[in-house]
Amino acid sequence: MSIVNNVLGRFSKDIGIDLGTANTLVYVKDKGIVINEPSVVAVNKRTNQVLAIGNEAKKMVGKTPAHIVATRPLVDGVVSDFEVTEQMLRYFIEKVHQEGFTIFPRPRVVIGIPSGVTEVERRAVEDASISAGARQAFLIEEPMAAAIGARLPVQDASGNMIVDIGGGTTEVAVISLGGLVTAKSLRIAGDELNQNIIEYARSEFNLLLGERTAEDIKIAIGSAAKIDEPLETTMRGRDLVTGLPKEVVINDEQVREALMRSVRIIVNSIKTTVEETPPELVADIMKRGIVLAGGGSLLRGLDKVLSEQTQMPVHIADDPLTCVVRGCGIVLEDIDALKDVLIPTQYEKPPRIF
């Protein structure tokens, strides 16, 4: 079987995958990022058939009949539905190989996973990748991948602090000598901020919002600190009293109030991580600053709030949304030199005794 895999592997393109709660990004060796689609799968419950994956499935969220369910197979960055995750991965692997002549792609795959996952959750990602057609699956912790993607010198004997705020998890880590010195994985990130807006609309205006509407509001006027130019937008939903459609104009101050609790938790966990970091590394971080990555770092004024609270410089990485997948890609391009930053996997061959 391994000979067949090696032969098929010659014609396959090695890929790096940022398997996120909100979006999945795919990097192809020598090509760059080729896919950036939502991690959503639409399944027909009557036939168990997958109807759509990615962008097509995202359009169906909240608009499906009873027998069609548009779900996210990953919750808080962890596989919650194994079969659907496997089908989603297979779809992305096959999509990458569409232009070539590979009938059975067998690529090597580097996948980013949250730092706080259990052994079982880690194996679920590995098994899903191997079942979806990967020849070898390499796992890398997301904060490490984000730091490599942000071009931080992770293999040096110096402290680098990265905060990766994704859809399902916020990863806070201090990295030195190719490993995580202190790390925290929070289940509070972009999705939780959307939920805060939904709860605020319900308690303040008796208005029921959908998830997509809440996300649009967050992107349009969401902020963590006071902004110079006041912003406002219209939120449309269902009135919980009359049951009829209703629209309300909301401003950035109200949205900021809604997001405040979650922002405070993220800030406090960053402060706690700094407290647990050895003083030598804290001195390095004070000089270099904290680097923010992930879609959540695009929340207006978050860097300002963090800088005030930690008394350290805070920088947002270039193109924070793609940091993790770019890091996976850099590892993929030179897997032998960077193999120390990967997590040992169950599929690594045991040493031969004879």
Image (tube, rainbow, N blue to C red):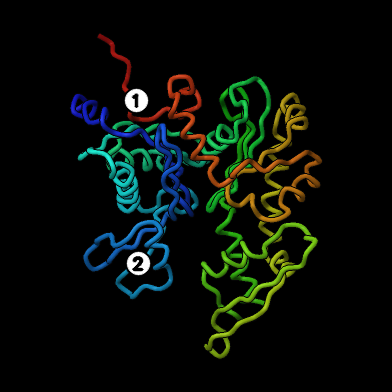
Q: Is residue 112 left or right of residue 134?
A: right
Q: State which quadrant residue 71 falls in.
A: bottom left
Residue 128 in sight: no
Q: Where 168 falls versus 205 (above or below)?
A: above
Q: State which quadrant residue 28 falls in.
A: top left
Q: Where 268 falls versus 61 (above or below)?
A: above
Residue 285: give x, y in percent of width and height: 73, 31
Which mark identifies residue 69? 2
Task: Please state which of residues 304 and 179 is positioned toward the viewer in this rendering.
Answer: 304
Q: Going 18% across and 28% down the picture, which residue do you hit?
A: 4
Residue 184 in sight: yes
Q: Going 21% across and 65% down the picture, which residue do you hit?
A: 47
Three-letter code, disc 1: Glu
Residue lying farthest to the bottom in this orientation: 242
Asked which secondary structure carries label 2, the reply is strand
Task: Please state which of residues 77 and 166 is positioned toward the viewer in this rendering.
Answer: 166
Q: Earlier in the sequence, mark 2 or mark 1?
A: 2
Task: Please state which of residues 343 and 149 is positioned toward the viewer in this rendering.
Answer: 149
Residue lying farthest to the top in this orientation: 354
Badge 1 density bin: few <14, some 14–19, many ≥20, Cα 10 Å: few
Q: Image quadrant for the C terminus?
A: top left
Q: Image quadrant for the N terminus?
A: top left
Asked which secondary structure carries label 1, the reply is loop
Q: Going 72% across and 57% down the picture, which residue do you hit?
A: 224
Which mark identifies residue 36? none
Q: Is residue 117 left or right of residue 66?
A: right
Three-letter code, disc 2: Val
- Residue labelled with disc 1: 348
Residue 353: give x, y in percent of width and height: 28, 11
Q: How many marks?
A: 2
Residue 64: give x, y in percent of width and height: 36, 73
